[in-house]
Structure formats: C-alpha cells, structure tokens
Image (spheres, rainbow, N blue to C red):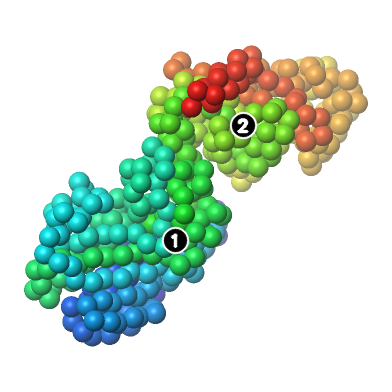
C-alpha cells in the first residue's frame, strides 16, 4: 500500500514522505510485536500524529533470546533531505522489575507510559546547548517522536496482555556522518542526527521546516547569552562576514530567503538587536519591502535600481539599460560608469532601513549591510556599525 500522497507546490506535483520520528516509532512497534508474539513481521502499520496511517516495510530483523531489533527505511518523498534512505533501527528487550529508577530520559512528558525505557544509541545526537526541546546531555529525540515511540510500544504490550517493562534503543548507523551535513552542529547537537517530526509526515520542500530550523537556531543563540546577533541569507553572507568584515560567523543565524520571518522570530524571542548582512542580489529587494527574497516570490531588482537611478538623475538611456540587465553585477557596473553608484546606494539603504524598522517594530534594534563580491560593501543602514559593536561585545562575554 502506498505510504505517500501527492501535494502541489508552485504548480508542481510532489510526493510526501515520513519523518525519522515515524521510522523510529514504527521500528519500535514492529520489534515489540515480534518480541511479545514470537512472530516475524514483514510490514508494520503506524498512525502518525497527522492522522495518516503508514504501512512500512520492516528490514534487517534480528531475533535473539529476550531481544528483537529491526529497521525502517526513511522515505523523504520529494523533499531534498539528507536523511532520505537511511535505516532507523529499534532494539527492544524486557527489563527487570525496577523500571521506575531506570527511566531517566523524558520522564516528565511520558510518566503515563510507565512500561517503556527509551534510550538512544549510535548515530543519535546529544544536546550540548540550551534552547532545544531536550535538556543538555539528553539525546536529540524530540518530544513528539518520544511520545510516538512509547505509545506504539505500549500499544503492542497491551494487545499481548503483558504488564512488564521493556527497554527500547533507537540508533542510526550512519547518523554521525549524516549529521555533519545538517544544521545540528550549529544548533549544539553533537554526534549524530535528531529524531524529528511533529506530524510524522514530511511535506516536500516545506517552508515551515526551514523556518522552524531558523527559529531554533536563533533560540539557541538567545538562550546562550546572545541577545544581539548577525543574520545572513547563506554562505555568501557568512563568508563576507568572516573574510571581509572579520566578524565571527558563529554569531550569525542563517535565514535563507526568509528575512521577514527571521525578524518576526527575533521579536518573538525578545532579541535586543539583529544586523543583516547580505549580497545585493537578495537584499536589494528589501528596498521595496519584499521580505521573502526567493525569485519565485518576487524579483524587482532592476526596477528598484532603475527607480533609484532615476532619482539620482540617471539618463533615460541608463534606465533602459538597467531594465535590460540580468544580474546586479551588470547593473552596478552601469551605475558606477554613470558616476551615481554611491548616491543610488545611499537612497537604497534608506528605504531598506525604513522597511526593516517597519517590520521589526519598536522593540528590536535592526540594521543591514549590503555588499557585492566585486565591490565589497555597497551600503549600510544608520545603526549598522553600532549593532556590529554590540554583537562583538556580547560574543566576547558568552
């Protein structure tokens, strides 16, 4: 039976998948069933928090005396996810009587499910910083997957009429290597991947998944003493921050195209100030109040530059040439040749500051630095230097 459904995103038909949390819960359920029944199963069903029932193939079954382990293969659907295809394992065994003292992790949220000790093994990360769902030192199995695992195991125990405790070990053999390609190292999760998922289902190219990660990254900064930080869209911004400005990139949060959302996150987390550092290809859009800088949302780069060039006294021919440019690099060369680059960047930064402050409101200090790879810094908002000093000062004290 199919385990995925079809959704439409930007006029494209895409396939959903299921999370590492669903894999872990399904593997634990299958292993528990085989432990209590003695049967070998090739498929397991699991109802996700989204209410969708999955039918998943059970792989790599190992049965020993008082122990069963098996794996579920992750399917991310059409989501570009580095965990796609990994095997998530669960091993289940009966435990001795004194379960209450042994059940250390996650007890507060799971006390009603008293039969299940949940542990994390190879390839599951450990939390090393404040601001995440789990406490420092705990495994990076989030709250909803923890509940899913325990409920799935308890269901099988109840069906079999067994009133004994079991120990459930979750592991991912390739987890440590895969984790290096994720946000985990920046979030303070070391040694492996996270077991994630609030609905159990992976939405293809989910904007919410990206913005949730951005929020968590800023939350970690905030709860570890950084109430001022840099915000960069991606690697261009990080490299410029470090190589050209000489600032520590570990004081930065990556926002991708979601400038508006990261400002909202900063307000929600009661940050005191943020300084955005970005390439003109994205940040020129801020001068028109475009807070999602992805090209499919809006472009307007040449229209903005043409309008400001006109205000600076640019000729009609220059405006026409600007409107025909494909890249901001070409447009900047025209403005420099015309001798109005500095004036154009000055009025552009005034508009960027206006729109950023409007979005941030009164409770958040905000500024921006815009650059190009060829010309370096093109412009700064009025508070940019002061914000940079505050960020550097906070960084030294953390």
Mark 2: secondary structure: loop
Which percent across, then down, holds residue 56? 35, 74
Q: Earlier in the sequence, mark 1 or mark 2?
A: 1
Give whichever of 301, 52 is nearer the camera: 52
The residue lying toward the viewer, choosing from 83 and 289, is: 83
The answer, for residue 389, to whether it is visible in the render is: yes
Query: Where is mark 2, residue-wise?
Result: 248
Q: Nearer the viewer, residue 77 or 388?
A: 388
Q: Residue at coordinates 57% horizontally, 35% vertically from top-left? A: 250
- Residue 354: image quadrant is top right
How many numbered badges does the structure rendering display? 2
> For the point 44% across and 27% down, which residue is it?
225
Q: What crowding class fits label 1: few (fewer than 14 Cα within 10 Å), some (14-19), or many (20 or more)?
A: many
Q: Is residue 208 left or right of residue 252?
A: left
Q: Which mark is residue 203?
A: none
Q: Which mark is residue 123?
A: 1
Name the residue furthest right.
337
Residue 350: % across, % down: 66, 17
Give coordinates of residue 217: x percent, y percent. 47, 39
* 175 sits left or right of 166 in the view: right
Q: Is residue 314 left or right of residue 40?
A: right
Quarter of the image for residue 347 reads: top right
Residue 204 vertical position relative to residue 187 in the rendered view, above or below: below
Q: Residue furthest bottom?
A: 39
Vertical side of 179 occupied by 277: above or below: above
Which residue is located at x 38 percent, y 37 percent? 130
Seen in the picture, residue 128 relative to 350 is either above or below; the reply is below
Instruction: Residue 204: tell me if it is visible.
Output: no
């Amino acid at each position: 039976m199919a385990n995925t459904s079809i959704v439409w995103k930007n006029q494209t038909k895409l396939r959903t998948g299921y999370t590492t949390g669903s894999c872990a819960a399904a593997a634990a359920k299958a292993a528990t069933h085989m432990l209590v029944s003695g049967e070998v199963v090739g498929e397991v069903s699991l109802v996700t928090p989204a209410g969708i029932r999955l039918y998943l193939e059970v792989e790599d079954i190992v049965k020993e005396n008082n122990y069963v382990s098996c794996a579920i293969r992750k399917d991310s659907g059409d989501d570009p996810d580095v965990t796609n295809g990994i095997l998530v394992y669960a091993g289940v065994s009966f435990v001795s009587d004194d379960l209450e003292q042994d059940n250390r992790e996650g007890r507060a949220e799971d006390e009603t499910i008293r039969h299940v000790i949940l542990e994390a093994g190879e390839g599951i990360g450990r939390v090393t910083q404040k601001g995440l769902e789990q406490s420092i030192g705990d495994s990076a199995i989030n709250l909803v997957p923890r509940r899913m695992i325990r409920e799935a195991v308890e269901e099988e125990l109840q069906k079999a009429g067994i009133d004994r405790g079991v120990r459930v070990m979750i592991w991912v053999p390739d987890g440590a290597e895969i984790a290096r390609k994720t946000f985990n190292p920046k979030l303070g999760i070391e040694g492996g991947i996270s077991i994630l998922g609030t609905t159990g289902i992976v939405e293809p190219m989910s904007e919410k998944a990206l913005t949730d990660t951005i929020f968590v990254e800023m939350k970690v900064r905030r709860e570890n003493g950084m109430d001022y930080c840099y915000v960069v869209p991606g690697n261009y911004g990080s490299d410029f921050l470090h190589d050209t400005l000489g600032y520590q990139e570990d004081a930065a949060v990556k926002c991708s195209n979601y400038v508006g959302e990261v400002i909202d996150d900063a307000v929600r987390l009661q940050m005191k100030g943020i300084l955005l550092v970005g390439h003109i290809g994205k940040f020129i859009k801020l001068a028109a109040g475009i807070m999602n800088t992805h090209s499919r949302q809006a472009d307007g780069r040449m229209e903005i530059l043409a309008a400001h060039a006109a205000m600076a006294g640019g000729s009609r021919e220059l405006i026409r040439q600007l409107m025909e440019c494909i890249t901001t690099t070409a447009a900047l060369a025209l403005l420099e040749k015309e001798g109005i680059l500095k004036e154009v960047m000055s009025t552009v930064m005034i508009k960027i500051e206006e729109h950023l402050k409007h979005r941030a409101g009164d409770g958040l200090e905000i500024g921006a630095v815009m650059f190009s790879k060829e010309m370096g810094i093109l412009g700064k908002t009025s508070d940019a230097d002061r914000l940079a000093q505050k960020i550097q000062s906070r960084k030294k004290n953390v």
